[in-house]
Image (cartoon, rainbow, N blue to C red):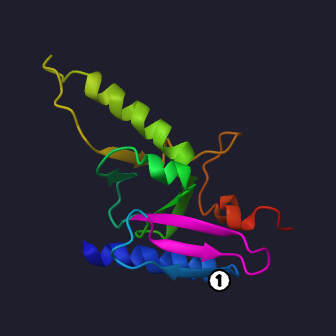
């Protein structure tokens, strides 16, 4: 499992580099940020958290709680599907309200047998529900959404 994590981080850094950005992986002790990226033309920077999976499921499991400091720091998430090398890019500001609402709804629900569900402390990003543009099109490999590319031609 750990090797998938670093593979996803290297993949994202490589994609950003191909697009002309500077991207560097953070140290293991850097909490909640995997990549620091910068646009050498504009000086714009971006903090990125990478989540990856190599299985065919449309979901990424995220342990923990809403990370308010990631919202304040304008962290961006890149969900890497290592099975087909697609990436889904979304800001923590947009991501966490969606995931929190779905988690709360799930935790209020009941099993098929009528018993109340045990609370699930995890969030689940789902590429089939969570990453769409204003027109309802799935955002995949949407690197241009990162603030690094804002204001570029």
- Is residue 76 shown left or right of residue 115? right
Looking at the picture, does residue 10 appear above or below residue 120? below
- Residue sitting at 69 percent across and 61 percent down? 147
Q: How many marks?
A: 1
Please tell me whether residue 34 belongs to the stretch shown in magenta.
yes
- Is residue 16 shown left or right of residue 58? right
**Viewer-nearest residue: 80 or 56:** 80
Task: Decide: few, some or many residues near mark 1? Use Cα within 10 Å; few <14, some 14-19, many ≥20.
Answer: few
What residue is disc 1 on? 18
Picture coordinates of residue 144, whole percent (x, y)? 70, 63
- Residue sitting at 70 percent across and 40 percent down? 134
Picture coordinates of residue 78, whole percent (x, y)? 51, 62
Mark 1 secondary-structure assignment: helix
Q: Which quadrant holds the N terminus? A: bottom left
- Residue sitting at 56 percent across and 53 percent down? 90
User: In which image quadrant can residue 148 be found?
Assistant: bottom right
Farthest top residue in view: 114
- Residue sitting at 55 percent across and 56 percent down? 73
Please tell me whether residue 30 belongs to the stretch shown in magenta.
no
Q: Which contiguous range is marked in magenta?
A: 33-51
- Is residue 103 shown left or right of residue 84? left
Looking at the picture, does residue 127 appear above or below residue 78? above
- Is residue 144 shown left or right of residue 106? right
Q: Which quadrant holds the C terminus? A: bottom right
Picture coordinates of residue 104, whole percent (x, y)? 34, 29
**Viewer-nearest residue: 44 or 126:** 44
């Amino acid at each position: 499992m750990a090797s998938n994590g670093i593979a996803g981080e290297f993949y994202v850094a490589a994609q950003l580099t191909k697009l002309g950005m500077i991207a560097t992986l953070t140290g293991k002790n850097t909490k909640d940020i995997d990549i620091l990226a910068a646009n050498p033309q504009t000086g714009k920077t971006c903090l990125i958290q990478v989540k990856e999976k190599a299985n065919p499921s449309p979901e990424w499991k995220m342990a923990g709680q809403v990370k308010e400091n990631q919202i304040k720091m304008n962290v961006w998430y890149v969900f890497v599907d290592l099975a087909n090398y697609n990436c889904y890019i979304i800001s923590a500001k947009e991501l966490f309200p969606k995931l929190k609402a779905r988690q709360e709804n799930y935790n209020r629900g009941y099993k098929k047998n009528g018993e109340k569900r045990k609370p699930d402390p995890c969030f689940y990003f789902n590429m089939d529900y969570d990453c769409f543009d204003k027109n309802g099109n799935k955002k995949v490999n949407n690197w241009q959404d990162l603030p690094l590319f804002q204001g570029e031609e």
